[in-house]
Structure formats: structure tokens, C-alpha cells
Amino acid sequence: MVTYGLDDKPPLGESVLLGVQHWLTMVGSTIAIPLVLTGALGFDAAQTAQLVGTFFVVSGVATVAQATVGNRYPIVQGGTFSMLGPALAIISVLAASNASPTVMMRQLQGAIIVAGLAEVVIGYLGVFGRLKKYMGPIVIAVVIGLIGLALISVGQITSATQNWYLAGLTLALIVLFSQYLNTHSRWLKLFPVLLGLGAAYLIAVLLSVAGVANIVDLSPVASAPLIRPIVPFQWGMPLFTGSFIVGMIAGMLASAIESFGDYHSVARMAGEGAPNERRINHGLGMEGLGNVFAGIMGTGNGSTSYTENVGAIGITGVASRYVVQVGGVVMVVVGYVGYFGAFVTTIPNPIIGGLFLAMFAQIVGVGLSQLQHVDMNQNRNVFVVGFGLFAGLSIPQYVANVQAAADVSFQAGLASVPVVGAVLGIPEVANAVRIVLGTEIAVGGISAFVLDNTIPGTREERGLTAWEEITEDDDAFVPFHEEFLSDGPSRERQVGDD
């Protein structure tokens, strides 16, 4: 059930809290990605803090842009794991040549800027939008399902060193507030994530202060600067290398496939029809601009739609774009105010892990719910879904094992991929193929797409007829600039309006 729809505008105070809740759900990934990068780059503590703040600023600006002039969905933008793989590969090559950390970052900036420009072209030329008529509920179910399933291995969830009781407490509180007690209190219905995280964090602080367990360290907050300067090209002017650009474009394509699934997922959770071609094109085009902005600001990573926040919409029923816009402003403030960013780093990993369990489970369920439009009594549909999910989980694992077995230089790792390295002998192509085959969403989505469009089956059996009926009309999405120039800015519905 949707409490606040796309055009609803809750009171400002409530919107701020709801926006902060969105911000908290993406904290784990927004911190994890820069920490992985800084570890590989060899950044010191000050540079690490600077990079975390930069991630928040880029995420906030990209989120406001997407919700306002992009696809206009309440979907948060942030760093992407799809582009983290090629980034680490680039760093590996540069480290072997004894490049400095800032030179490595400048190379990442250049590759990300070009990859972003490529996504701008893909988006605004309508490449993915044209593919939409071939991507029915079977393909979307596999893609969205894998978005959640692929995140099982996230360290905050599977690490054997976690405080299991703290992760379990966080998960139990979120489930309790969102599923069992949500009808008893409006606050529990709207803020289950915020209340669950807050209660678990408070308990962790009390245990630490009492000396029972050393869980929370608040010293980073005390030593943080009031204002953290974050400016364009703060690491230096970008550098451009062909092979690095090819690898980053492959990561961008995997990210675009994930976002395609996220658009359908958020529409489903918001109680809206499936996104039309125009909305998809504008969304991916804006994500490309977000990547360019990330490259200019120097995150060493790109920008994509955040799956965690899609899950938050499903749990809370709050699908207001205004709330997400407010949350974007909060992220920008957090990035520039040193105390806030430092405070976020004190949230223990077990609490983030408990949050992720609830969020990702919601996403998997939403993916599988797409199959309600499909005749699952037909063996071809059962096979396509099963094969897409299993291939999406198994083939990337195989590629990862091959890469780990090589355990040598980047070039040797490429050559270890069967056929690609040995036959083609082109590192750039091999790198691109390795990245795509190592991405669960790309493998599963492509597999399901090919099988669903080649195995004989009627449109009714495949769910395409029902899919067309629930897809929003062509005029349902009006870009912000066209709306503004024609009729003036639209007035979003205030809650309580007649």
C-alpha cells in the first residue's frame, strides 16, 4: 500500500525525516565503495574522509537532478559496484607502474567521464527505450530478482566477524515495525528503517560506553572539520587512456541494465504503471550526466540508481519524489559538513548488515512479483526464469574464481578468461567481456532476454499482453523543461488537498 504517491508532498518536517531515512538506507554502500577505493589507492585518513564526503555531495546532486529533470521517479542516485570492478582493475595496472595515488584517481576520472558521456548518448538516443518492447515481465523479474540476490555476498551481511546479535536486532526491529506494528502507529508505518536503525545504534552506544563491548567509536566525530571543501577536479585534471575507458564503459553498461530493472521496480512499488520508453531514456541519460559529474568531482566511481532505496519505498510505502529531493539536499549538506559525514562512519557494520537483509529481501520479492503477469504453467517460462536466475548467479562466480586462480597481474588475469584472452588477444575487449560476464545482472538479464525472445511462446503466455496494459501512457511522462515551458511548473499535490 502506498502512503505517499509520486506527486504527494508531505509537510516539510516530515519530509526531512523521510529524506534522512532514505539517506540512511544508502549509507552502507556509499561508505563501502570509497573505503574499498581508498584502500586500493593508498589514500591516508584525510584523503579517505574527503572521498567519502565527495560521494555524498555527488549522490545528493545527482538524486535531485534525476527526481526533478530526469525520469522524475523517487529514486536515489549514488556510487555503483558495477564500476568498482573496472576501477580496481585500472588501479592494479597503475600500481604495477608505481603511479601515485593522485595519478590513479585522475585516470579513473577520465575513464568515468567518457563512460558517462557514452551513457548520455545511449539514453537520449533511446537505445534502451527501443529494447523495452522485447523486455517483458520474465526478463524484468530475473533482472530485479538478481539485483537483490547478487548482493548476498556484501560484507556487512556475510562477514563471519559480525556481531550477529546486533545484526539480528536491527533486522528484527525493522521487520517488527514495518510488517507487524505498521498499522498501530503512523510513525511506525512511515519510519520503520529510521526507528530500527536508531534503536539498534543507541543500544550499541550504550554497550560501548558501559564497557560491555567495543562497538561504536565516536572519536572520528570529535576530530572532524566543521566544513569539508569539495570542489571539481580536486585531485587534478583527468587523464584519458583507451583501455581503461573500454573497461569502464563495460561497467557502465552493467549499471544501466541494473537501473533499467530499478525503474520498473520503483514504479511497481509506487503503484504506477511500468515506465514508458520516454521515461527510461531520460532516466538513463540523466544517469550518464551523473557519471560525468562524478568524474569531474573525483569520486573514482560513477552514479547509478540505488537499489537499497527502492527497497525502502516498498517497506515504508513512501514514494514521494519530493521526499527524495529533500533527501538529496540532506546528502549534499552531509558531504560538506564534516561532523555529519564522520558520524555516519561510526554506524557499526552489523547494523548496516541487518538493514541490508531487510532491503534486499524486499527487492527480490518485488522482482518475483512481476511473474504474476506470466503463465507459469508453461514450461518455457519456468525454464527461462530458472535459467536466467541460475546463470546470473553461477557464471559470474565462475569468472571470479578464474580471476582469483590467476592471482597475478591484471594482464595475466585477462588472459586467464577462457577463449577471450587466448583467441582474441585484445586486452581491452577481454576486459570488457570479463566485466560483463562477472556481473550477475548482466548475465542473468541477457540470458533471459535471449531465451524469452527465441523460445516459441505466445505474447499472452509471456505476459507481454498484460505488460502492455499496465505500461503508462506515452503522455504520462512529461520532461520537466517541457512542462515548465508549456504550462508553467506543475504544483505537486499537498497532502490533505481536496
Image (tube, grey):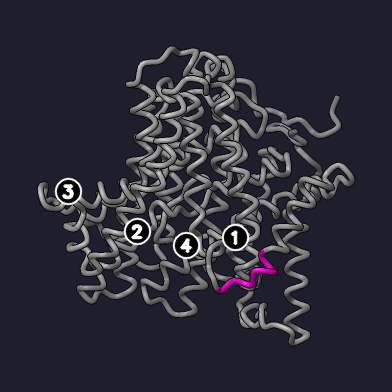
Between marks 1 and 3 in the image, the one whose residue lies nearer the viewer: 3
**Residues under numbered marks 4 and 1 in contact, where contact means CB atoms less than 8 Å apart:** no
3 or 4: mark nearer the eye: 3
Look at the numbered disc 1 and give the secondary structure of its residue: helix
Q: Is residue 14 above or below residue 495?
A: below
Badge 1 or badge 3: first in the primary sequence: 1
Disc 4 to disc 1, C-alpha distance? 10 Å
- Structural crowding at the residue carrying mark 2, measured as other residues with C-alpha within 10 Å and reported as few (<14), some (14–19) or many (≥20): many
Q: Neighbour class for label 1 at 10 Å: few (<14), some, many (≥20)?
A: some
Q: Nearer the viewer, residue 409 or 102?
A: 409
Where is 217 relative to 113, above or below?
below
> Which callout, 2 or 1, points at the residue further toward the start of the chain?
1
Q: Amino acid at mark 4?
A: Ile
Residue that numbered label 1 is attached to = 27
Residues marked 4 and 2 touching at CB (< 8 Å):
no
Q: What residue span does the magenta drawing correspond to? A: 161-167
In the picture, measured across the screen, residue 394 lies left or right of residue 260, that is left
Amino acid type, residue under disc 1 in the picture: Val
CA–CA distance in space, label 3 to label 4? 28 Å
Measuring from the top left, give residue 22's x and y in whole percent. Answer: 66, 51
**Residue 147 position within the rendered picture, expressed as x and y whole percent measured from the top left:** 49, 44
Q: Which residue is mark 3?
A: 420
Indicate which disc, 4 or 2, sits on the residue closer to the N terminus: 4
On residue 109, the disc is 2
